[in-house]
Image (tube, rainbow, N blue to C red):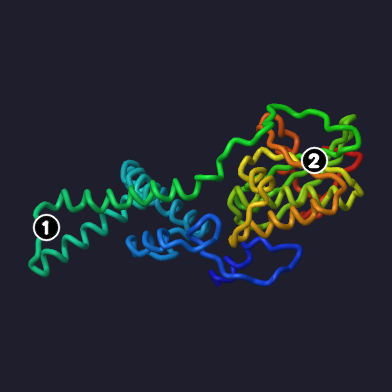
Amino acid sequence: MEDGVAIKQIPLSVRQPQDIIYWWPSKDGIYTTKTSYWLGRLNQGGRMFGRNNEEVSEVWRKIWNLGGPPKLSHLLWRACIDILIVMALAWASWAYRNSIVFNQPWPCATVGAAGFVRMVTDYQGYVAKVTTQGWKATVDGTRADWAPPSSGVARVNTDAAILEGTGVGMGAVIRDEEGRLLMGVRRREVDWDTEVAEAMAARFGVEMAAKLGFESVELESDSSNLINKLKHESTGLSPIFLVIEDICHQASTFNFFGCNHVRKCGNTVPHYVARLRPEDGNEQIMCHSFP
C-alpha cells in the first residue's frame, strides 16, 4: 500500500523514457559513498527520511489530544520536530545500556551521549552542504517586478502552490508586450516537494504556450534553483530531471526560448492563479473571463 502511494507521487515524463534506478538520498539521484556512509552510521535506511505526511499528521493529532498537561504535549511536539537529536539520545542510551550489560561501561555517559549527538549534527551539516551547494547560485538578470517582453515574445510566468490536504496547484500566466492576458491552472492530488512542484508548473506553462501556438517564449519563475537548472541544462537521475528534460525538449520546438528569474513580488499573478480550483477539478485555461 505504501509503495503504491509512493509510486503515484513520482512525476512522470511526457516523453515516456525508459525507467531508471536512482539513489534517493542524494539531490541529483546519483550514488555517492558519502551518503551511503551516513546512512550506515545512522543505521536508519530509507525509513528515517521517508515519513508519510498522513502518518505525521496523525502523530500530531495524537500528541495534541493526549489530554495531559499542555507542557507534556509541547515537550513531545518539540521532540518530534527535532527528531534526529532525540533519536541520537535514544541511540546513545541503548549503546550505554549495552556497555553495562557486556561489562564495558563508558568512562563518562555524558561525554558518550554528546558524541552521538555530535555525529548527528555533523550529518545534518553535511546534508545541508551537499543538497544546497551549486543549486543556490545567483541568477543573472533577476528582476523585482514584471516587465513587458520584447515584441513578438510571449512571457510565461509560472508558480506552484502546496495546498494542504488537496495536493499541488500549478499556475501559468502568458502575456505579450501589450500585457494581454491568458491564464491556466492545473491541480494534482500529489505530495511533491516545492522544487518538483515548481518544475511541474513551469512544464505546464511551456506546454500551454505551445498548445496556444506561441513560437517565441520567455519563461519566468521565482524559483532560482529551477532557472539555474534550465539555463545550465542540468542532468541527473532523480525524477525532477525528467521534468527539466521535458521543458528543454519543449523549448527546442520554439523559434526562440529564454528563461529568467523574477522575485516573488514580480510573480504575484501566477501565485494567485495556482490557488484557484479548476472548474473540472483538474485543469482550466482562461482566455477571456478571469476570476
Q: Nearer the viewer, residue 243 or 173?
A: 243
At 65% from the left and 71% from the top, the residue drawn is: 19
Task: Classify mark 1: residues with Cα within 10 Å, few (<14), some (14-19) or many (20+).
Answer: some
Amino acid found under the numbered disc labelled 1: Trp
At 63% from the left and 40% from the top, the residue drawn is: 224
Q: Which of 47 and 202 is in front in this view?
A: 202
Q: Percent from the top left, x then y, of residue 33? A: 41, 62
- Relative placement, left or right, of 216 versus 109 is right
Q: In which quarter of the image is residue 231?
A: top right
Q: Quadrant of residue 236?
A: bottom right
- Between marks 2 and 1, how big is the CA–CA gap? 63 Å
Amino acid found under the numbered disc labelled 2: Glu
Task: Classify mark 2: residues with Cα within 10 Å, few (<14), some (14-19) or many (20+).
Answer: many
Q: How many marks?
A: 2
At 70% from the left and 48% from the top, the residue drawn is: 169
Q: If you read the primary sequence from the N terminus, does the residue marked by circle 2 or circle 1 appear first? A: 1
- Relative placement, left or right, of 181 versus 278 is right
* Residue that label 2 marks: 218
Give SS at disc 1. loop
At 81% from the left and 55% from the top, the residue drawn is: 280
If the image is split into quadrants, where does the N terminus sit? bottom right
| Up/down of 111 relative to 44, above or below | above
If the image is split into quadrants, where does the C terminus sit? top right
Q: Nearer the viewer, mark 2 or mark 1?
A: 2
Q: Percent from the top left, x then y, of residue 50? A: 48, 60
- Relative placement, left or right, of 176 versus 51 is right
* Residue that label 1 marks: 106
| Up/down of 23 relative to 152, above or below | below
| Up/down of 79 relative to 145, above or below | below
